[in-house]
Image (cartoon, grey):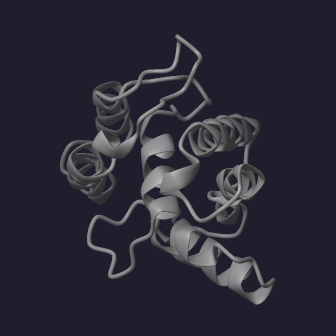
């Protein structure tokens, strides 16, 4: 069984903080409040605690949150999936924040994150292939819409 480790908590916390700030800086792009974006970032990887194979954490997490009545369960369910048949600004933001946050919560560019995923899982892994395709979608369809990025100069904006 996988576990929701301290490093995963740091990752989720920094995803949450990035989401909150981007929503605060770009309120016209999102339907959720900054606080809701923060909650979404915190819980997006929670199902690592409940799955044997990490490839299933998104769907398991979304299903758990749906049962609890969490408004943004779909964003958790579909995060990391470049072929999702569901899209929302919050999902794109979650994917972006996830792609610029390393596995221990460190700030990375999207390119650095892809290298990290390739090093951990291999370039032929489903994790890398999905992340690569998702990064292209996020860069083309979401990043240009952000008017005011994150204020922390240590946080990469795009690539």
Q: Position of residue 94 (x, y in %)?
A: 51, 53
Q: Residue furthest right?
A: 68
The answer to which image quadrant residue 92 occupies is bottom left
Q: Residue furthest bottom?
A: 67
Q: Position of residue 137 (x, y in %)?
A: 23, 54
Q: Position of residue 148 (x, y in %)?
A: 48, 31
Taking depth in this image into account, of 85 and 145 the one nearest to the observer is: 145
Residue shown at 39%/79% (left/top)?
86
- Work out which quarter of the rendered image holds the N terminus and state it: bottom right
- Compared across the picture, whether 91 is left or right of 151 comes to left
Residue shown at 53%/43% (left/top)?
26
Residue 143 sits above or below residue 65 on the image: above
Taking depth in this image into account, of 2 and 18 the one nearest to the observer is: 18
Q: Residue furthest front?
A: 28
- Compared across the picture, whether 87 is left or right of 49 comes to left
Q: How many marks?
A: 0
- Compared across the picture, whether 116 is left or right of 140 comes to right
- Work out which quarter of the rendered image holds the C terminus and state it: top left
Residue shown at 33%/50% (left/top)?
142
Residue 124 sits above or below residue 14 on the image: below
Residue shown at 50%/71% (left/top)?
56
Residue 95 sits above or below residue 25 on the image: below
Q: Position of residue 15 (x, y in %)?
A: 61, 41
């Amino acid at each position: 069984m996988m576990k929701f480790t301290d490093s995963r908590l740091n990752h989720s916390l920094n995803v949450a903080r990035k989401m909150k700030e981007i929503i605060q800086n770009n309120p016209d792009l999102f339907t959720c409040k900054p606080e809701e974006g923060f909650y979404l970032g915190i819980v997006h990887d929670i199902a690592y605690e409940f799955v044997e194979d990490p490839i299933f954490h998104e769907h398991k997490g979304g299903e758990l949150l749906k049962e609890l009545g969490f408004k943004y369960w779909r964003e958790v369910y579909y995060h990391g999936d470049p072929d999702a048949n569901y899209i929302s600004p919050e999902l794109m933001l979650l994917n972006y924040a996830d792609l610029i946050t390393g596995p221990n919560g460190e700030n990375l560019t999207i390119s650095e994150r892809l290298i990290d995923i390739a090093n951990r899982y291999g370039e032929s892994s489903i994790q890398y292939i999905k992340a690569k395709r998702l990064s292209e979608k996020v860069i083309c369809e979401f990043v240009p819409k952000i008017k005011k990025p994150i204020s922390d100069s240590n946080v990469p904006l795009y690539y």
